[in-house]
Amino acid sequence: MRNNKNWVKVIAIALTIVGCSKNDSDTNTDTTTTTTTGVPITSAVQSKYTSAVTISTSGSSITLKSNGTPDHVTPYYGVGHALYEAQMVGSTLNPGTIGVQNYAMTIPTNPVEASTKEVTTLGPIGMALNGVPIYNDREGGNVPVDAGVLGSFDRAGAHPGPGNTYHYHCTGDFMGNDDAKLIGFLRDGFPIYARKDMDGSYPSNLDANGGHIGITADFSTAIYHYHASNTAYLGSRFYILKSGSYNGTKGTFTQ
């Protein structure tokens, strides 16, 4: 992958649900880099997403549809649900529950680096392999996730937001954490992995947006991909999935 310019590698709760709202109208940018022809992702998308996600392709786009409900246990399902479990000791629950949604995320078949990097905003920034949205490290008011919000996360590093929209902010016990598992794809089409590289090491050359270029277990051709942070957030058991900007141009995410 060639560069024409230098690379510039550049989620409180008040027991009411006021955060994690969508805010796609806010477009912030940082620095510039080049575009390329991109590495095709269609095969990986089709083989890695679970049956809970419906996948279709049209031209240079892939559309993924899901109802946003997790396939693992969580206290937010509520007592009586087959996938209910009690909240972790010492943690709290926000007033939300898990609602059935109608998500559609459209991403490019061959994602390329954007010439201008757009800062991720509130709301969905990607979709995990089970169809649950991925959010960044910020909450309502566009402020970083604080200890109060962190205390509402279940074992998956997730909680519901307005409209009972369950979503992930962090790694957890079900998707990938201290490993090299593929977690999902962000709205720019680039994959996001857990904290390790394929060789079992922690990447030491991530850019300011949490990514780098290299081969993975899913891509034999080197591709830009994100990693979850390897820093325990506020000293907790959780690791932020994504902060900063998109490497590519984001596609749409509707509900």
Image (spheres, rainbow, N blue to C red):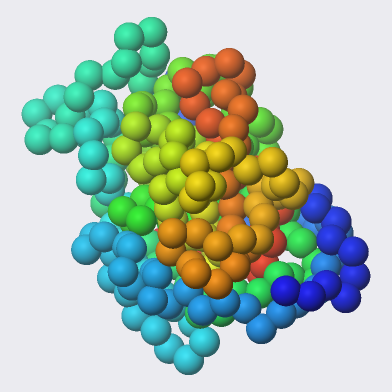
Quarter of the picture holding the C terminus: bottom left
Q: Residue at x 42, y 77 (%)?
A: 42
Report the front residue among 143 and 185.
185
The residue sitting at the bottom extreme is 59
Residue 244 visible in the displayed image? no
Quarter of the picture holding the N terminus: bottom right
Q: Residue at x 16, y 35 (%)?
A: 83
Report the front residue among 50 and 207.
207
Measured from the top left, where is residue 67 in percent x and y? 29, 57
Report the front residue among 59 and 193.
193
Residue 115 visible in the displayed image? yes
Please give left or right for residue 53 compared with residue 189 in the image.
left
Report the front residue among 113 and 250.
113
Please give left or right for residue 186 compared with residue 7 in the image.
left
Please give left or right for residue 148 compared with residue 143 in the image.
left
Quarter of the image for residue 171 reads top left
Q: Residue at x 33, y 63 (%)?
A: 48
Measured from the top left, where is residue 186 in percent x and y? 53, 59
